[in-house]
Image (spheres, rainbow, N blue to C red):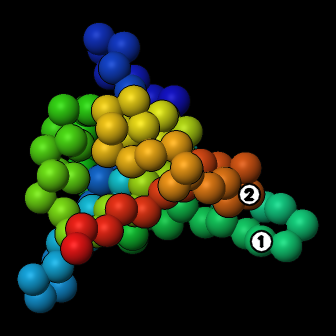
C-alpha cells in the first residue's frame, strides 16, 4: 500500500457527478491501474474511473459523507471503511482476490 511521509495509507479518489447523484470511486493508491485475473474474471482498476485526487483517510471520509453512491476497491480502503463503520463486513465481496464494496444512500 502507498503511504505518505507520516506512514498514513493513501487512496485514489474520483468524484463523478450525474444530476443530483454523487458517486465517489475510491481505490487503494497502490492498485490504481492494475489488472487482476481469476479463472472467469478480469478486474481492471481503471484510472479513468478511480484516478483523481490522492487523499488520506480523513479527506476520504469527508468525500464519502457527501456521496449518494460509493464504490470502494482494495484491502486498505475496505478495512478502513469497516473499521470506521461506513460499511459492514457482510457487504464486502472479493473480485479476483481484491476486496470490494458499494454503498448506496437512499
Q: Could you tell which of marks 1 and 2 lies nearer the N-terminus?
A: 1
What residue lies at 49% left-to-right and 66% top-to-bottom? 46
Of 94 and 48, which appears nearest the observer? 94
Task: Say which mark, if any, is on residue 20.
Answer: none
Q: Is residue 11 above or below residue 19?
A: above
User: What is the residue that sits farthest to the right in this orientation?
Assistant: 39
Mark 1–mark 2 distance (CA, rounded to whole Å): 7 Å
Q: Residue furthest top?
A: 6
In the picture, measured across the screen, residue 64 lies left or right of residue 38, that is: left
Q: Are marks 1 and 2 in contact (CB under 8 Å)?
A: yes
Q: Residue at x 23, y 43 (%)?
A: 60
Displayed quadrant of residue 38: bottom right
Residue 75, image x, y percentages: 55, 39
Above or below, 91 relative to 29: below
Residue appearing at x 26%, y 32% in the figure = 57
Q: Which mark is residue 96?
A: 2
Label 1 environment density (alpha carbons within 10 Å; few <14, some 14–19, many ≥20): few
Question: Does residue 101 show up?
Answer: yes
In what element is the residue under mark 1? loop
Q: Secondary structure at mark 2?
A: loop
User: Residue 41's mark?
Assistant: 1
Residue at the (18%, 32%) spot, across then down: 58
Amino acid at each position: 500500500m502507498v503511504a505518505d511521509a507520516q506512514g498514513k495509507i493513501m487512496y485514489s479518489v474520483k468524484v463523478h457527478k450525474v444530476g443530483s447523484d454523487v458517486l465517489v470511486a475510491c481505490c487503494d493508491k497502490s492498485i490504481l491501474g492494475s489488472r487482476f485475473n481469476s479463472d472467469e474474471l478480469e478486474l481492471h482498476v481503471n484510472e479513468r474511473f478511480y484516478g483523481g485526487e490522492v487523499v488520506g483517510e480523513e479527506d476520504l471520509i469527508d468525500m464519502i459523507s457527501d456521496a449518494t453512491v460509493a464504490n470502494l476497491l482494495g484491502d486498505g480502503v475496505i478495512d478502513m471503511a469497516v473499521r470506521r463503520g461506513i460499511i459492514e463486513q457482510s457487504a464486502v465481496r472479493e473480485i479476483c482476490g481484491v476486496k470490494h464494496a458499494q454503498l448506496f444512500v437512499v
